[in-house]
Image: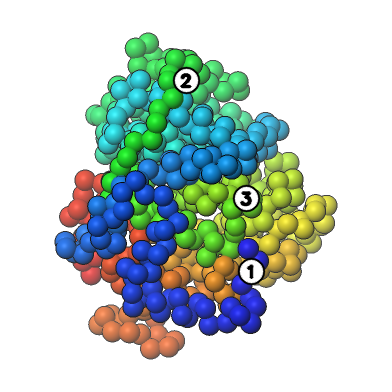
């Protein structure tokens, strides 16, 4: 999809945003046609128990089926679903939709053989390897609830998440890789289990060649052995309102907040966002340079691109130092990336190491169409540097773990609005965003206020916190 900046696109954003506010059920019911349902919903929006709004109540689906199986069944099994590019090892691996489905089904069978059933929690503590995505999708396949913990977290942070999620099983790896060093994961996992009150019955461990992990007899299972002994698992039907995952964000009390993401609204919102916000078509290559431990990795390395039928890039490396500040341009050129999403911090590092952008000229970026930045504020000098050297639209957009997908963005698939440096443009359709003063009244232009989003939040956002409805109200809704 080309960027929607033709005269025909003029006014499309305003019309769509207005419709999403005036008729949210019609708007999102139409968007939900992009997902395959086992049973259609009774209500697009169930508002019977505010502030706990639920989307697509009564609907039944499977997220893994929508990410993988349906593409295979429609003759697209030989298309590339995932490209794993490890700058740390020099290894690249491509997975077709059919191949990835088979790997996921087999690992889902391994989870099931080790006692995991629908509704059970599985903690995933992994580096940036394809097995992390396979484990996430395998959980979704059998209706288990995954909770990915960022591989950079130490044992105490992992232990608090084990205690809150109470997983039946943990999936981990022997090590992660950083420039110049190998980080052993297994001792961290073992220590976290010692610290935690909720101890998993099983751990499945991926042995990487850079470091071999010692195994605890009776608890730990080798990934390859578990897969070899397993039968492939079929997709399990789940309610649209059933949780797909819990992702922990830092809590002000020291106790992390478990952001819940449901199956139905999440699939609908992410599928819609790929074409409308990011302007990509199925079969195009989309790359989010993040980590599966963060919400960006969940939404736009694993689920969003695969729901849409794109090719997603999973990169194990850094923006600089693996080997130089041209690492990102090498990946974009080598894999034909059309749309790229990363954090402003990465570009500040690239600009520092290559201020004149000379390394950009070493690569053929003819397929590259747009850069999206999020994660912290995009300072105008960095954004201007990227625009000048890349000569593509550079979009600063805003969202967070709680929302699951963008709140404010230039929506390239709807209408390309003029970029205003320092601003994430306007609210995405589906969102009613206002700035209110201390009295709760709309702030005047130029007046500082609080950015607030009107309830009900759109599909794909947090319906509550894990086992903490009261804390959800206290943390987000009381003021």
- Residue under pointer 3: 283
Foreground label between 2 and 3: 3
Say which residue appears at 61% left-offset and 72% top-offset. Answer: 4
- Residue under pointer 2: 227
Q: Dot 1, how many residues are within 10 Å of its Cα: few (below 14), some (14-19), or many (20+)? A: some
Q: Dot 3, how many residues are within 10 Å of its Cα: few (below 14), some (14-19), or many (20+)? A: some
Query: From what the image shows, is residue 115 above or below residue 339?
Result: above
Q: Secondary structure at mark 1?
A: loop
Q: Secondary structure at mark 3?
A: loop
The numbered mark, 1 or 3, whose residue comes first in the sequence reads 1
Position of residue 188 measured from the top left corner of the image (x, y, whole percent): 43, 28
**Is the C terminus in the top left, top right, bottom left or bottom right quadrant?**
bottom left
* Alpha-carbon span between mark 1 and mark 3: 17 Å
Task: Please tell me in which quadrant of the rendered image residue 449 appears.
Answer: bottom left
**Is residue 199 among what the camera can see?**
yes
* Alpha-carbon span between mark 1 and mark 2: 43 Å
The numbered mark, 2 or 3, whose residue comes first in the sequence reads 2
Say which residue appears at 60% left-offset and 46% top-offset. Answer: 311
The numbered mark, 1 or 2, whose residue comes first in the sequence reads 1
Say which residue appears at 71% left-offset and 33% top-offset. Answer: 90
Position of residue 342 measured from the top left corner of the image (x, y, whole percent): 58, 55
**Is the N terminus in the top left, top right, bottom left or bottom right quadrant?**
bottom right
Position of residue 119 measured from the top left corner of the image (x, y, whole percent): 27, 36
- Residue under pointer 1: 3
Query: From what the image shows, is residue 34 above or below residue 133?
Result: below
């Amino acid at each position: 999809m080309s960027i929607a900046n033709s005269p025909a696109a003029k006014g499309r954003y305003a019309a769509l945003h207005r419709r999403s506010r005036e008729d949210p059920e019609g708007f999102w019911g139409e968007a939900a046609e992009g997902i395959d349902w086992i049973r259609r919903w009774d209500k697009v929006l169930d508002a019977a128990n505010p502030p706990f709004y639920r989307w697509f109540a009564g609907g039944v689906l499977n997220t893994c089926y929508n990410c993988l199986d349906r593409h295979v069944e429609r003759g697209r099994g030989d298309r590339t679903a995932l490209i794993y590019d490890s700058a740390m090892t020099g290894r690249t691996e491509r997975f077709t939709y059919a191949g990835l489905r088979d790997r996921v089904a087999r690992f889902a069978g391994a989870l099931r053989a080790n006692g995991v059933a629908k509704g059970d929690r599985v903690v995933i503590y992994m580096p940036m390897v394809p097995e992390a995505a396979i484990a996430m999708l395998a959980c979704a396949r059998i209706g288990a609830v995954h909770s990915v913990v960022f591989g950079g977290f130490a044992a105490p942070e992992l232990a608090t998440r084990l205690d809150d999620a109470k997983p039946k099983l943990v999936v981990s790896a022997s090590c992660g890789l950083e420039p110049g060093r190998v980080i052993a994961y297994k001792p961290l996992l073992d220590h976290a289990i010692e610290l935690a009150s909720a101890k998993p019955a099983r751990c499945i461990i991926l042995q990487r060649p850079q470091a071999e992990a010692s195994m605890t007899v009776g608890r730990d299972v080798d990934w390859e052995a578990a897969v070899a002994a397993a039968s492939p698992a079929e997709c399990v039907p789940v309610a649209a309102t059933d949780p797909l995952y819990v992702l922990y964000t830092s809590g002000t009390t020291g106790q992390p907040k478990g952001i819940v993401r449901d199956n139905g609204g999440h699939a609908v919102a992410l599928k819609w966002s790929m074409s409308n916000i990011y302007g990509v078509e199925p079969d195009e290559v989309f790359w989010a340079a993040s980590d599966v431990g963060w919400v960006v990795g969940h939404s736009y390395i694993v689920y969003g691109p695969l729901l849409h039928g794109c090719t997603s890039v999973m990169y194990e490396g850094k923006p600089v130092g693996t080997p130089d500040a041209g690492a990102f341009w090498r990946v974009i050129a080598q894999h034909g990336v059309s749309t790229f999403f990363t954090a402003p911090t990465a570009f500040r590092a690239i600009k520092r190491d290559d201020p004149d952008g000379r390394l950009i000229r070493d690569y053929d970026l003819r397929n590259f169409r747009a850069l999206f930045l999020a994660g912290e504020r995009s300072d105008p000098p960095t954004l201007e540097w990227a625009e000048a050297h890349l000569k593509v639209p550079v979009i600063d957009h805003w969202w967070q773990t709680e929302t699951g997908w963008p709140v404010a963005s230039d929506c390239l698939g709807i209408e390309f609005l003029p970029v205003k440096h320092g601003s994430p443009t306007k609210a995405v359709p589906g969102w009613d965003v206002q700035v209110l003063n201390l009295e709760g009244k709309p702030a005047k232009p130029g007046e500082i206020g609080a950015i607030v989003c009107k309830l009900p939040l759109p599909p794909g956002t947090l319906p509550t916190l894990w086992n903490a409805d009261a804390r959800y109200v206290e943390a987000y809704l009381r003021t």
